[in-house]
């Protein structure tokens, strides 16, 4: 089935393992068989590709291909921009990864100007205070708004609250108050071939469980897609895949 493709862009949660990080049917064998073709990409705003690759190695106990995350792309962007001060909405551990690329990181409304408001993950503590500070900065400044994880909802239960839902609510409120703001999002479906290190002439297929990120990405890149879904019917009004299967085991 996959012999015609040069590269396979593979999702993680819901594709390789469940929300509880339990390997799904056929995932270990799939990694072994197509190792040379696979590029793993995850919309995770709290871990780098290197960190996630280590996690996957421990879970599957097989050689893991290259892993890229949305946090990797965000960090690269921050390095190129060289912001002076950013407001960070996310875990303290993520702030430590961001700190080499910016001069100052704040988590409350500062006296000095903020160059960017960066959302990466849900916060550890004081989330109400952090959310209110974010809203006021969005309303009162022209700072760039950056989102390190574009996942809004899982296509199947359990459904988890995400940092993206928080940012969407803040931007919606800002728009209602006639202060239209737009965030720059890092990750699927906003990837280019250059970001995932796939050449223009290489034949690519995207495999994942989320129509709004994985399948939408394949449409943007004008390539084939395979949706992993336990449902017999496709979700109405969601991007349609080239093929829908229940697990990677079906490909094997």
Image (tube, rainbow, N blue to C red):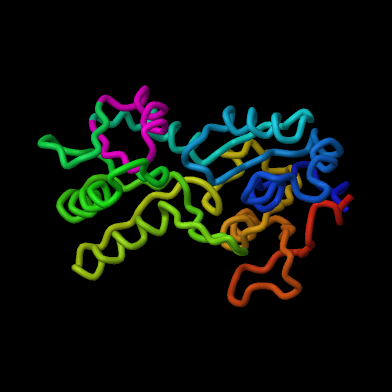
- Residue 69: quadrant of the picture: top right
Coordinates of residue 94 in the picture (x, y in percent): 41, 33
**Vertical placement of residue 43 versus 78, above or below:** below
Q: Which residues are magenta?
A: 85-103
Depth check, front residue: 180 or 62: 62
Residue occupying the far top of the picture: 100
- Residue 120: quadrant of the picture: top left
Residue at left offset 79%, top offset 38%: 31
Residue at left offset 72%, top offset 75%: 233
Residue occupying the far left of the picture: 111
Residue at left offset 73%, top offset 48%: 204
Depth check, front residue: 32 or 60: 60
Coordinates of residue 177 in the picture (x, y in percent): 19, 68
Does the magenta-highlighted stretch encompass residue 97?
A: yes
Can the viewer see residue 80 in this picture?
Answer: no
Left or right of 91 in this view: 203: right
**Vertical placement of residue 61 versus 4, above or below:** above
Can the viewer see residue 181 in this picture?
Answer: yes
**Vertical placement of residue 234 versus 225, above or below:** below
Residue at left offset 18%, top offset 53%: 136
Left or right of 24 in this view: 219: left
Coordinates of residue 57 in the picture (x, y in percent): 70, 30
Coordinates of residue 43 in the picture (x, y in percent): 54, 46
């Amino acid at each position: 089935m996959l012999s015609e493709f040069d590269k396979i862009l593979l999702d993680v949660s819901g594709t390789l393992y469940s929300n509880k990080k339990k390997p799904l049917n056929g995932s270990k064998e799939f990694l072994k068989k197509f190792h040379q073709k696979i590029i793993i990409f995850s919309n995770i705003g709290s871990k780098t590709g290197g960190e996630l690759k280590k996690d996957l190695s421990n879970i599957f106990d097989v050689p893991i291909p290259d892993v890229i995350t949305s946090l990797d792309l965000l960090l690269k962007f921050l390095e190129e921009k060289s912001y002076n001060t950013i407001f960070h909405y996310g875990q303290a551990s993520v702030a430590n990864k961001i700190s080499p690329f910016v001069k100052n990181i704040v988590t409350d409304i500062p006296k000095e100007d903020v160059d960017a408001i960066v959302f990466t993950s849900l916060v550890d503590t004081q989330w109400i205070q952090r959310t209110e500070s974010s809203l006021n900065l969005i309303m009162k400044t022209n700072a760039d708004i950056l989102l390190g994880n574009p996942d809004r909802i899982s296509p199947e239960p359990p459904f988890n609250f995400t940092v993206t839902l928080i940012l969407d609510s803040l931007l919606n409120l800002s728009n209602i108050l006639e202060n239209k703001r737009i965030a720059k999002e890092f990750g699927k479906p906003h990837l280019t071939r250059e970001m995932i290190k796939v050449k223009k002439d290489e034949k690519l297929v995207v495999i994942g469980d989320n129509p709004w990120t994985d399948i939408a990405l394949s449409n943007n890149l004008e390539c084939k897609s395979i949706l992993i879904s336990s449902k017999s019917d496709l979700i109405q009004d969601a991007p349609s895949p080239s093929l829908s299967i229940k697990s990677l085991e079906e490909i094997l």
